[in-house]
Amino acid sequence: MTKRYEWRDGRSQAVEASVVAARLDVLRKKHDRKVVEAKDFVKDAASDRSPLHPLFDWDDARCAQQHRESEARSYIRNIVVVEITNSKAKQALPAYVHIKTADRQGYAPLDEVLAEPDMAASIMQQLWRDLQALHSRYVTYAAEFGEVREIVEQLQSVLQRKAA
């Protein structure tokens, strides 16, 4: 059996997937580890001579802004609303959820999203894409994760019925 490396979903990058995979093996051996840490990947890529170098934006000001925006997304995603019932049972729900509209994307309060049919449909579409990605990721491990695969397929079936 031969192996070929490709980028997930046919995405193209500045460097071929096979080149990156080979470099990952080099880094694992260089650091005498079974895993490659992201910091080692970035450190290697910082060299102009590294085949990984073209994968990154090396403009520090632009990267700092992008990093702050990434942190902001994380903060927004991690705010929850805790609903306490009479039995004092807690249920934590996301306060804000990511929404894509025709002209922009960003975060909106969950209760407003659920009240607006178009935005609620956007959440259902994202859930469907997430389930498909989860299924694709683990379908090759069917023997080991068969029960998980069945659960994902049941969820997909429920979503298809709701969409119809």
Image: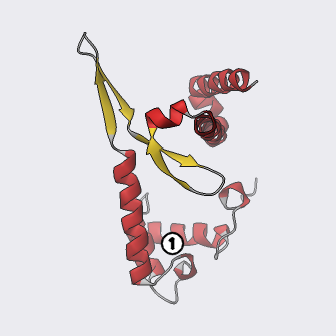
Q: Identify the residue shown where x is 70% and y is 55%.
A: 9
Q: Identify the residue shown where x is 58% and y is 22%.
A: 147
Q: Farthest residue in the bottom direction?
A: 48
- Left/right placement of residue 10 relative to residue 106 reads right
Inspect this view and state whether residue 1 appears: yes
Residue 22, given in percent of the width and then of the height, sits at 59, 70
Inspect this view and state whether residue 31 appears: no
Q: Identify the residue shown where x is 54% and y is 77%.
A: 52
Above or below: residue 127 compared with residue 39: above
Above or below: residue 90 compared with residue 54: above
- Left/right placement of residue 71 relative to residue 131 reads left
Q: Where, by quadrant of the figure, is residue 19 drawn?
A: bottom right
Residue to which mark 1 is pinned: 26
Above or below: residue 118 compared with residue 87: below
Q: Where, by quadrant of the figure, is residue 41 drawn?
A: bottom left
How is the rendered protein coloured? secondary structure
Q: Identify the residue shown where x is 69% and y is 22%.
A: 162
Residue 3, given in percent of the width and then of the height, sits at 71, 58
Residue 65, given in percent of the width and then of the height, sits at 40, 73
Along the line of sight, which residue is nearer the eye, 3 or 5?
5
Badge 1: how crowded within 10 Å, few (<14), some, or many (20+)? few
| SS label for mark 1 | helix
Along the line of sight, which residue is nearer the eye, 69 or 142?
69
